[in-house]
Amino acid sequence: MNQGLHVPEELLNQIDYILTHLAEKAHTDSIVLADISGQVISINGIMDEGTPDVVAALAAGDVAAMAELSKRIGESDPHGSFFHEGESKSIYLHNIAGSFILIVIYRAETPIGLVRLFAKRAVEQLMPITEEFEKTVGPPSSYMPDGFSKGITQELDDTFPED
Amino acid sequence: MFINWKLREINLKIVYYGPSLSGKTSSLEYIHSRTHPDRRGELISLKTREDRTLYFDYMQFQMGEISGLKPRFNIYTVPGQVYYRGTRKLVLKGVDGIVFVADSQINRLDENLEAIKDLNEDLKELGFEPKDIPFVLQCNKRDLPEIVPVHTLKEHLGLNGIPTFESVAVDGVGVLDGLKSIVNNVVTNARGKINPDPA
């Protein structure tokens, strides 16, 4: 049964610290940590509203396609990393244990080796933390803020206004 | 479902599933066009040169804060063609609710049935129990001449008892009703899943 992720603030703070360190060391433009289904977990750097969500969704598709490609050529571990090299900006994607994706966006003049070096270190640090928050998925409970369901009806009307 | 307790956000994923050319992308395009501009993200479509969905279509909309939590909905479609099954399975990862867009035409019954079988198999392979996932049936193309009665379609697909909406996605008829239904079902289902802030 899928119960989703419930990431507590303490673990998010640890993730933020690691991403900030990576950004400083590798001179990145922006960084997104997402889960394998494309949900944004944490962001570092400035991105337009909505952009991290799109980046995460597309990266999830990309990582899944790359994992399948790796299998087709006989790679035993399809959870590696890969680059998209652009003219002004490039992207580095790292599949963390098949559960999470580190997405690093950096300027083309930044050496790839620098990004790869510090991204790998960040992945090593993120690995135990992401394992931790897998553990935060507990059995179903009946908790939900009061009035949440009722509030949804009004919010739906506001989100999809009549002509 | 992903809950970020730091930002007090609840992220939910809804997938529009169904056979090829049943109206999944048209539904999403209509939803995007009708979403309040301040509350919607960009509509992303990864299409082939023939304008058919290759990976998925994607959009996000968010709502105002409710009881201290900000709901954000990620809406995906899947490519319907048989040979894109791997992609469909990918998109189903982490799904919180499904809208099955059926093609109501008599000559598409078998494709609908095949899609339902694939969906159930994929969900099981991903660790879901299909009956536990909020589900809505959207019977599309109700404006065409040779269509199956809704009750026949439901019976054929084994979907009796499922909330059902008749639609003409290209005109937007019935699309928002189906979406609002799945959103409500997803939220109701989430009530039994959310744990108190573990921090």
Image (cartoon, grey):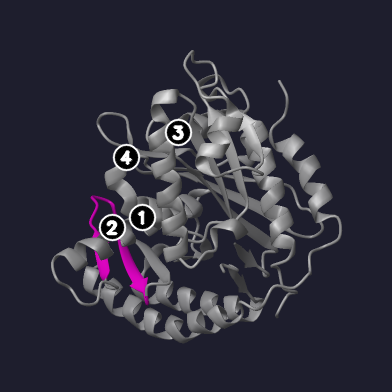
Q: CA distance from mark 4 to mark 1?
A: 17 Å
Q: Amino acid at mark 3?
A: Thr
Q: Which mark is residue A65?
A: 2
Camera-side mark, 3 or 1: 3
The answer to whether mark 3 and mark 1 are in CB contact below 8 A is: no
> Residue A75 is drawn in which quadrant?
bottom left
The answer to whether mark 3 and mark 2 are in CB contact below 8 A is: no
Q: CA distance from mark 4 to mark 2?
A: 17 Å
Secondary structure category for the residue under label 1: helix
Image quadrant containing the N terminus of chain B = bottom right
Q: CA distance from mark 1 to mark 2?
A: 6 Å
Q: Which residue has dot 3 on it?
A: B25
Secondary structure category for the residue under label 4: loop
Q: Position of residue A97 (x, y in %)?
A: 37, 77
One can see residue A55 in this view: no
Say few, some or many: other residues with alpha carbon within 10 Å of mark 2 (under 14 / 14 to 19 / 20 or more). Answer: some
One can see residue B60 in this view: yes
Q: Residue at x 36, y 69 (%)?
A: A27
The answer to whether mark 1 and mark 2 are in CB contact below 8 A is: yes
Q: Amino acid at mark 2?
A: Ala
Camera-side mark, 4 or 3: 4
Please name the predominant secondary structure of the magenta segment in the image: strand
Q: Nearer the viewer, residue B194 or B35?
A: B194
Q: Amino acid at mark 4?
A: Gln
Q: Does mark 3 fall on the same chain as mark 4?
A: yes
> Residue B70 is drawn in which quadrant?
bottom right
Q: Chain of mark 2?
A: A
Q: Which mark is residue A61?
A: 1
Secondary structure category for the residue under label 3: helix
Q: Which residue has dot 4 on it?
A: B81
Residues in magenta, as a range: A81-97
